[in-house]
Amino acid sequence: MFEIIKVGPPPGMPRLIAPIKLEPADFAKAAALLGVEPFRATKTGLVAARFAKHRERIETRWNGKETEAIAEPGDAIVCNMSPSREILRDAEGHPNAYVILREKFPELYEPEGTTSEQGDIYRSKAAVHALYFAGGFELMAPWGEVQRANSGYLIHNGSELYGNNKETFDATYQRQ
């Protein structure tokens, strides 16, 4: 169950509210409610990843807290990088870090062959589908935590739906 409300300023910007985890069928329903076709995008930015040795709480920040997740041993702790290999940082200097489950990471990324201060560098293996929400979102992420952004995209990545704030998406993805 989700809803799309109109927020502003300016008035009428769509905002996605989803208090429970979204399913793949919800993506098509959201597109229909918006009256748009989802677009396909590929990740042009790289990621730096290290693998958790012990249980860690990772807070994803982009000009404020976006979400948090618990990394279990073996899970990837990932930082987004620009195509020019710079770690993406918000206005407060926090790296854009998040968790990917150990079994999911090899499906999404392959080694690029170099390293950074945040870990080995990887490139994306797959494209995603996306919907833009100018008014942002507040949704239950697949990892069981609320995810928020003032503007951003709903991403459909295989069997998962999650949010990505506009600035990070624009810096790391390209529409096809």
Image (cartoon, rainbow, N blue to C red):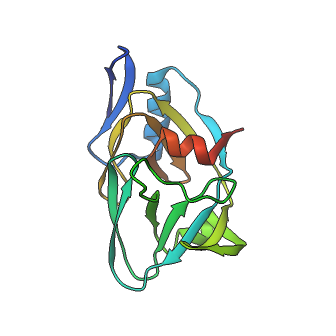
Taking the spot 63% from the left edge, 66% from the top edge, the residue there is 109
Residue 28, visible in the rendered structure: yes
Viewer-proximal residue among 103 and 134:
134
Residue 140, percent across and down?
31, 49
Residue at x 59% of width, y 58% of height: 81
Residue 8 placement, left or right of 162: left
Question: From what the image shows, is residue 49 above or below residue 11?
Answer: below
Instruction: In the rendered view, tell whether residue 145 sits above or below residue 51.
Output: above
Depth check: give the residue in front, 89 or 47.
89
Callout count: 0
State which quadrant residue 80 falls in: bottom right
Above or below residue 87? Residue 19 is above
Task: Residue at the far bottom: name it.
Answer: 53
* Outermost residue, left side: 19
Q: Position of residue 133 (x, y in %)?
A: 44, 30
Q: Is residue 138 left or right of residue 82?
A: left
Is residue 62 left or right of 103 when viewed as pictured?
Answer: left
Q: Nearer the viewer, residue 98 or 23?
A: 98
Image coordinates for residue 127, horizontal then vertical, percent: 66, 50
Image quarter where the N terminus lies is top left
Q: Compared with residue 48, is residue 28 higher up or lower down, i.e. above or below?
A: above
Residue 5's image quarter? top left
Work out whether residue 128 can be spotted.
no
Q: Position of residue 67 (x, y in %)?
A: 33, 54
Q: Residue at x 51, y 66 (%)?
A: 78
